[in-house]
Image (tube, helix red, strand yellow):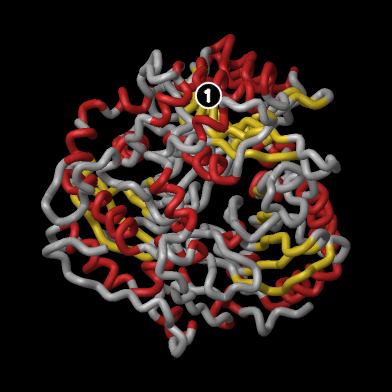
């Protein structure tokens, strides 16, 4: 789809003669990986008629049908078509795959929208109560800084969603082919750079929110929420609706449409945005469709943003035309032009992303196919002006912001490690109750971190001892007693509820970390801190392809092993081996670690070593 006045760009989806070596040679060094061994050729669109999922979006009347009717039925579940539309409302239909029977015991997972990971005391109290009364009793912090709630029955879904909407929160856009939850560095430092990152996370969330009346219509019977979204109030000064509908005449706005930026068919696939400050890569900034990095001017105030594009994790086993990709640097944009540039990038993906082959629909494939220079020109055809050069910034480092810190305004924040993001009460470990006690006693604001953990903010120094006491009384370990491997690790939920999982992740990860710890200790590597991630399928929810060492489920009891991601999360790893049996962990890793001991440079970290020597040199 092109617009009058646009530079016409012809996208060639078949790169049959282009080697992956040629592709990676044009990438910045930190973004290369051993995927040079894989021929990355995008599939040619096969069908001329609109794909079924695209037709479904058209027929849904902006995300209403057939969901509204299906929700009111007596059936335990909903149809496949209604399920696809339900995703835009923030929910997935699931069933426990370990319970066998002819009739599936359907339940629903609900995911919140929490820009910058913000979690108010009132929202936590509500989620604590809802998960107890209508869910499976726990909450799960995701890798995109929001909570998921599992185990909700269809008959209770409307009450749960409406309760969340009426308190000033939302589930809208937590899933579906729209802009997802906008991530931000979770560190609550009170200074111009971090303030700008948090504020603009909320700006982006408002700018790209779906405008369909379906959400209020279905969940609130057409009424407005009792409270507007809290992040909208925080960025009211930006007049975001006016900016959203502003038409520069270059094809960004879909005219006469309920959705001025998305149109009737929304985006080709999900779209992810993250924002950080120079030097802080606590959120895997290179994994986003758009990454923004705050740039301050000589006066110490916000000047604009460095912009990167085309990151993404999802792939499919045995399909070389799907791959993880780290984002490219696009350039710099002054703050006054930022929203218009963001709209231009989204419009570029909306109009030129591959809607014919859904496996290649993410914007990373568009950037990969045309190259960053051609993509930049295409964006500029919407933007109407040249994109400035990337501003030099401080190198990125990784920090999870756990433990006690001064936040810059006389108050403290505390980062609480949460194993695999699961907030629960189990035996003597009662993290869920501990958070409720903290919220009730101190009215603490919380930020969900990109590593599935929690950061309690705005703590008065005189309350520090009280916070520690509550955590210890509820069986929550102090940070110094958490193994660094566990602190760095992430995994997805996988079995038993995820329909895509091929094997275990969250439930087996603790035992894998314990086995790796034992192996490291036996080889005199007890001081090594290796960033390890695990997923039950190749979709990449826990961002495994950025890790130094990753396990990606590829069978009922097997994993792909990935090596060589950066300790500071600026490049992708490479696939080292497939079908590692769950019991072969030690025999697989021991020769690799032995080579690491003998051949590493001084102070070289494990991921950097594996990247330097490459897959052909690694022994196993």
Residue 188 picture location, percent across and down: 43, 32
Q: In the shown orientation, is residue 465 left or right of residue 556?
A: left
Circle 1 packing at 10 Å, graded few (<14), some (14-19), many (20+), is many
User: Residue 572: which quarter of the image?
Assistant: bottom right
Instruction: Say which residue appears at 66% left-offset and 44% top-offset.
Output: 487
Residue 533 picture location, percent across and down: 66, 54
Choose between 395 and 47: the one closer to the eye.
47
Q: In the shown orientation, is residue 522 left or right of residue 80?
A: right
Could you say whether the residue bearing mark 1 is in a helix, strand or loop?
A: helix
Instruction: Say which residue appears at 46% left-offset and 37% top-offset.
Output: 65
Q: Is residue 603 visible?
A: no
Which residue corresponds to mark 1?
161
Choose between 239 and 109: the one closer to the eye.
109
| As drawn, 580 above or below 411 | below
Instruction: Say which residue appears at 84% left-offset and 55% top-offset.
Output: 515
User: Residue 230: which quarter of the image?
Assistant: top left
User: Residue 147: which quarter of the image?
Assistant: top right
């Amino acid at each position: 789809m092109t617009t009058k006045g646009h530079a016409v760009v012809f996208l060639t989806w078949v790169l049959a003669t282009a080697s992956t070596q040629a592709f990676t040679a044009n990438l910045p060094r930190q973004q290369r990986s051993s995927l040079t061994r894989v021929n990355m050729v995008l599939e040619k669109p096969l069908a001329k008629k609109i794909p079924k999922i695209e037709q479904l979006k058209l027929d849904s009347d902006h995300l209403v049908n057939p969901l509204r009717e299906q929700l009111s039925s007596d059936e335990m579940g909903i149809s496949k078509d209604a399920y696809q539309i339900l995703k835009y409302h923030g929910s997935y239909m699931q069933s426990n795959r370990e319970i066998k029977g002819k009739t599936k015991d359907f339940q629903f997972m609900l995911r919140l929208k929490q820009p910058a990971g913000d979690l108010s005391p009132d929202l936590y109290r509500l989620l604590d109560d809802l998960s107890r009364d209508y869910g499976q009793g726990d909450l799960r912090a995701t890798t995109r800084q929001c909570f998921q709630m599992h185990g909700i029955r269809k008959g209770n879904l409307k009450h749960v969603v409406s309760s969340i909407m009426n308190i000033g929160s939302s589930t809208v856009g937590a899933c579906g082919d729209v802009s997802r939850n906008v991530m931000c560095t979770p560190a609550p430092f009170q200074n111009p750079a971090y303030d700008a990152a948090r504020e603009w996370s909320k700006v982006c969330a408002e700018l790209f929110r779906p405008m369909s009346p379906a959400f209020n219509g279905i969940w609130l019977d057409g009424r407005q929420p009792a409270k507007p979204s809290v992040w909208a109030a925080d960025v009211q000064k930006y007049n975001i609706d006016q900016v959203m509908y502003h038409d520069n005449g270059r094809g960004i706005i879909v005219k006469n449409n309920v959705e001025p930026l998305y149109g009737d068919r929304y985006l080709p696939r999900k779209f992810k945005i993250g924002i950080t400050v120079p030097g802080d890569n606590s959120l895997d900034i290179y994994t986003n469709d758009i990454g923004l990095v705050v740039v301050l001017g000589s006066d110490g105030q916000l000047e604009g943003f460095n912009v990167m594009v085309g990151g993404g994790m999802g792939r499919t086993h045995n399909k070389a035309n799907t791959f993880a990709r780290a984002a490219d640097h696009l350039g710099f944009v002054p703050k006054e032009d930022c929203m218009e540039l963001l709209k231009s990038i989204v419009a570029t993906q909306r109009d030129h992303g591959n809607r014919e082959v859904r496996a290649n629909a993410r914007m990373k494939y568009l950037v990969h196919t045309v190259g960053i220079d051609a993509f930049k020109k295409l964006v500029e055809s919407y933007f109407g002006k040249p994109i400035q050069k990337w501003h030099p910034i401080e190198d990125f480092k990784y920090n999870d912001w756990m433990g006690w810190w001064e936040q810059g305004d006389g108050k403290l924040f505390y980062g609480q490690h949460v194993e695999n993001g699961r907030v629960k009460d189990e035996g003597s470990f009662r993290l869920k109750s501990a958070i409720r006690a903290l919220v009730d006693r101190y009215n603490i604001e919380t930020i969900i971190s990109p590593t599935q953990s929690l950061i309690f903010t705005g703590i008065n120094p005189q309350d520090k001892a009280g916070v520690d006491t509550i955590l210890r009384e509820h069986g929550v370990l102090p940070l110094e007693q958490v193994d660094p491997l566990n602190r760095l690790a992430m995994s997805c939920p996988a079995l038993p509820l995820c329909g895509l999982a091929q094997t275990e992740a969250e439930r087996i990860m603790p035992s894998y970390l314990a086995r790796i710890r034992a192996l490291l200790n036996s080889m005199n590597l007890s001081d090594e801190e290796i960033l390890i991630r695990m997923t039950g399928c190749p979709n990449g929810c826990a961002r495994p392809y950025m890790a130094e060492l990753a396990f990606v489920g590829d069978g009922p009891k097997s994993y792909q092993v990935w090596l060589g991601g950066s300790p500071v999360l600026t490049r992708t790893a490479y696939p080292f081996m497939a079908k590692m049996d769950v019991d072969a962990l030690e025999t697989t890793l021991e020769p690799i670690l032995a080579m690491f001991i003998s051949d590493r440079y001084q102070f070289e970290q494990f991921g950097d070593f594996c990247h330097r020597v490459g897959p052909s040199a690694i022994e196993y």
